[in-house]
Amino acid sequence: MKLQPLEFEKPVLELEAKLADLRSSSNASDINLEAEVQRMEEKLEQTRREIYSNLTAWQRVQLARHPARPFSLDYMQLSFNDFTELHGDRLFGDDSAMPGGFALMGKHKCAVIGHQKGRDTKENLRRNFGSAHPEGYRKALRLMRLAEKFGMSFVSLIDTPGAYPGVGAEERHISEAIGLNLKEMMTLRTPTVAVVIGEGGSGGALGIGVADRVLMLENAYYSVISPEGCAAILWKHRKHAPEAAEALKLTGADLLNLGLVDEVIPEPLGGAHQDQTAAVLNLRKAVTRHLDELSVKPLDALLEERYAKFRKVGEFAEAL
């Protein structure tokens, strides 16, 4: 699948094309162009760093939605060991938009669940573009309770534009399913870690996002509403999405500063899709470290800290 470059990435693509032409010319002739090739490589690296080190909130949203970005199943199969998928919520059916199962993360036995998007139209239709139905959240709750019962840690991977708002989802009480998950995750007697790996949209993200530690990948976003939705409400047009993204304070750096996430996990230069191996390793290291810290805490102390953590959300002081 050939992907179109994002608008802000075009200078990098142009330099890469020039570098390829220069190398081709050098190989096809007897002229030594090694010095020119080296200068072009240095310019390309400098341009990459200038662009990707100064991304706007809207540009990070675009990277969070990149179709080549690693998805939940990629992390489940590569960051975790011995992943075994479980299906169904034991009430209605299975939801392909939210796969989950048992796995190992280092020495820790885990139940893991996450939103899953598709790489192409056919898979996106099967996965419902990462927007889970009520049965997806009830499957997550089933896995939470199994983790608690068998003394496993619980890890969730968040990557959704939002829960599915269709008629069927409303008929099967999606708001009740998400609300119940919020309640149960607050009192779950086992260590919990949530990681926003791409899009963290509204209640669809929060439905598996209440945890002892909430982490975010560097180019992920976490927000009560999408930039386009916010722009449509406040500016009456979706073209103002970039301004909305800035106003929403939805990037990892913003949320870390506000105390809403506990750590921002670095990504390879240009995004997780540029070096999947490095992205997988970074996530594995971060989640393992937090599980190591949480697993030695008494459960009563863990629940008290979790309660205090979320009670502080929304507290702020205005400078005079």
Image: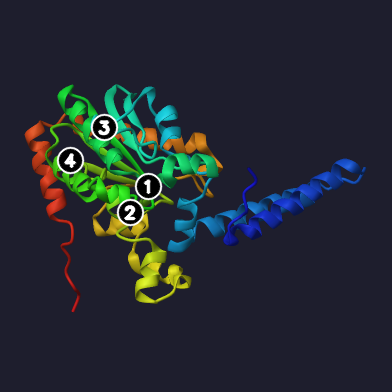
In the rendered image, which residue does mark 1 sit on? 131
Whether tag 4 and tag 1 are in contact, CB under 8 A, the answer is no
Colouring scheme, one of rainbow, by chain, secondary structure, one colour: rainbow
Q: Nearer the viewer, mark 4 or mark 1?
A: 1
Name the N-terminal-most of marks 3 and 4. 3
Query: Residue most toward the right?
Result: 30
Specify whether residue 35 is in view: no
Specify whether residue 53 is in view: yes
Does residue 169 appear left or right of residue 121 in this picture? left
Name the N-terminal-most of marks 1 and 3. 3
Badge 2, how many Cα within 10 Å: few under 14, some, many 20+? Answer: some
Q: Quadrant of residue 23?
A: top right
In the rendered image, which residue does mark 4 sit on? 185
Q: Is residue 75 above or below residue 271?
A: above
The residue type indicated by label 4 comes to: Met
What quarter of the picture does the N terminus occupy?
top right
In the rendered image, which residue does mark 3 sit on? 89
- Of residue 71 and residue 86, the one placed in the foreground of this image is 86
The residue type indicated by label 3 comes to: Asp
Horizontal and vertical percent for residue 313? 18, 57
In the rendered image, which residue does mark 2 sit on? 165
Q: Is residue 50 above or below residue 85?
A: below
Horizontal and vertical percent for residue 115? 37, 41
